[in-house]
Amino acid sequence: MNQTLVVIGNGMVGHRLVEILRESSWRIVVFGEESRPAYDRVALSSYVDSWSSADLELPALAGCELRLGEKVVSVDRERRVVVGASGVEVSYDALVLATGSVPFVPPVPGRDLPGCHVYRTIDDLDDIRATVEAATRPGRRSGMVLGGGLLGLEAANALRGMGVSPHVVELAPRLMPIQVDEGGAGLLKRLVEKLDLTVHTGTSASSIERDGQRLIAKLASGLELDLDVVVFSAGIRPRTDLDLGLELGPRGGYLVDAACRTADPHVFAIGECAAVEGVTYGLVAPGYSMAEVVADQISGGTKVFPGADVSTKLKLLGVDVASFGDAHAQTEGALEVVVNNAVAGTYSKLVVSDDARTLLGGVLVGDASSYLSLRPLVGKEVPAALLQPGGAVDVEMPADAQVCSCLAVTKQTITDAIVSGVACDVAELKACTKASTGCGSCVPMLKKLLTECGVEQSKALCEHFTYSRAELFEIIRATRVTTFSALVEKHGTGRGCDICKPAVASILASLGNGHILGAEQVSLQDTNDRFLANLQRNGTYSVVPRIPGGEITPEKLIVIGEVARDYGLYTKITGGQRIDLFGATVDQLPEIWRRLVDAGFESGHAYGKSLRTVKSCVGTTWCRYGVQDSVGLAIELELRYRGLRSPHKLKSAVSGCARECAEARSKDFGIIATENGWNLYVAGNGGFTPRHADLLVSDVDTEELIRVIDRFLMFYIRTADRLQRTAAWLEGLEGGLDHLREVVVEDKLGICADLEAAMAAHVSDYADEWRGVLEDPEKLARFTSFVNAPGTPDPTISFRAERGQRVPVSLGIPEVAR
């Protein structure tokens, strides 16, 4: 008769053990306390996207007896019998404890009140959702996540997906204190706060109280938060509630040796409930490694736990974060090489030995593309290029480096599968090597290795769509799909992600599918689009009214001045000839818009991937050198293309003569006057990688100029990749400028009439987004103060005086003028 293996716990690690042993001669019995099959707990927050647990389920495993909804209440180690809550008894020859962990809930008074939850299981998320849906607060709900580590930020992301504005409260002085250093955490905080999160570090909740239908959380800092829901996600503790009489590790967990065996030779422990030689691990990769050890041991092998790589790479709220090796430079004499690019929103730190020859570790925030190349180099000689700014991007990975740390799959294994012809795409690599079947973070490296091995890669927008952005544009246009859910159901898979959702939202908006804050559209947008304003560093927003061509009457200037004065807004004239008003809170935005709209202003779309400005000089109106009316043309173009949604922002300018005072050749499309008409330049940009625009047509009249611009812009919108500026688009366009001229000037493809018609439809359908919110009570209700009562100033927002205006208080700068 076959021997019996009993596994207590049906999580990811227990599932991995059964997966390894399913072809063995063992009879396998699995007790799962939850009523559903094993699911991907790493991707738990994505459950919010579809509320379908089936999307998270791990592959079903044949060959085992799965007892779902059956809690184990006792284990008789003398008789070697496991007893379930229903009274069932199962004898075992080997027992594996894979009970995982339980959430740690700090002893905060009020933690048991209705509306307070933990974040660990699908059932927990269902309970949180019920609380959110029952909340009576008008507009967007407010929530608090206690814990700013990995799990805390995941919980905050889940709340965002439910339409809740989360406050993240972290006792440590920075987010993710275990994985990320102070510099990386500073950037991480700035990036996540752009996503409708408010971060409170260096404090904790001192109490939670009920106030009618809401909760009031009092922080140790003295701040009070008015909330609809509270989520505790402050860490985990090994689950060891079964009284087995086994020794526990110093920090909990069943104490096991390197073979993952307890003091009882018939009992093993793996995953978060195990303390391997006294050490517990809270990551899935070490748990998988333990599962492999136990599978080998009970099959007669001698494999032992090799130690754990606690390096992590993940995307939190759309922000890449990674740490590896000695990330905090604790090795004696360690040196740090830091590149902090605040403009690009990236931070990288490499830790090297005191002689700068050995890589010890590192931290990456904002861009973790080099993580898979760098992590295998820990403990090895540092390539000289790594110590130069930007040198950490293209480092060759050694053949024995682990690409997939979850399942210990090396680069050599993957390249062998590609070169031998066994796998020619990511799906086949997953199937034959198991790489990326854990957390999935190594998919980009699989694609890179396929390319390096000469396999042509798909241009799919993301894993949910096999089409490029340009192809999706044509699908949406041809099928007249008007919602993301309908598109992904008919032409994609899964629930979507932070790559495809905003891209599809942009396509839908550019095809005239109603207001940007429509019922489904709003859930696809980034923060700036959701509030029709740019989020600033201190949690306030900027208001930028449109001023076509930079021309403005004294009466309108007075209105802007009065609004700025009455709301205490910082006022600045920009390089694009606009007036920016900074420092408005969310609940003030509609009030400010109403005054501006009543005065004849409209949204300047400074927040959107759309036309920003058409800058101009004064042209023939005033300048003695001007040869054409640059102001009149700039106004005409801006009013024509206002609100035009595109893959990236668009900037333009019109110069009235060759002296080029409007700097037209640094724009996405720029016009320079000539004695005979206009010259049109395209695909230029300033910023991080400046590029001069290229001459597309010359000496054309105004009618022909506008016709060519219409075609150029619509062709770009239809064919560019997501977040691709016109400069990069033209450089990547096959045939380059010559092909572009053939398409939009010579009409080689016969599509110019269609492009012109599409632009004409945009012009006729344009409506001001600010006015659209003001005229719609449902949209207007979203602009509500998220802290305390609506209309009450957010106490976390503070200002100081500088040159006669209010500016945000920065870290380390007191609330006085410098």
Image (spheres, rainbow, N blue to C red):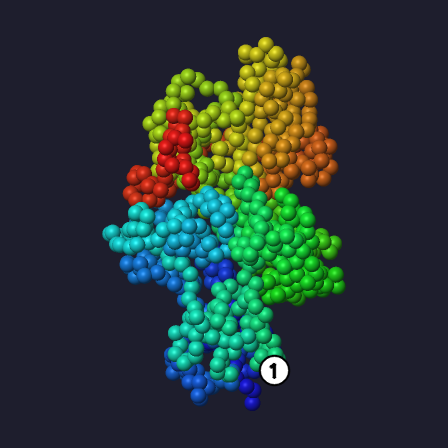
Give the x, y percent position of residue 412. Answer: 70, 63
555 lies left or right of 110: right
Disc 1 packing (10 Å; few <14; some 14–19; many ≥20): few
Name the residue rendered at 57%, 77% in the picture: 295
Name the residue rendered at 38%, 23% in the picture: 561
Numbered disc 1: secondary structure = loop
Give the x, y percent position of residue 428. Answer: 66, 62
Q: Nearer the viewer, residue 137 or 13?
A: 13
Residue 232 lies in what quarter of the image?
bottom left
Tally of numbered discs:
1
4 lies left or right of 159: right
Name the residue rendered at 43%, 70% in the picture: 250
Give the x, y percent position of residue 99. Answer: 45, 72
Q: Is residue 429 above or below residue 550?
A: below
Q: Nearer the viewer, residue 767 or 302?
A: 302
Give the x, y percent position of residue 372. Answer: 62, 56
Is the N terminus in the top left, top right, bottom left or bottom right quadrant?
A: bottom right
Q: Is residue 430 above or below residue 721?
A: below
Residue 310 in sight from this viewpoint: yes
Q: Amino acid at mark 1?
A: Gly
Q: Which residue is mark 1?
A: 300
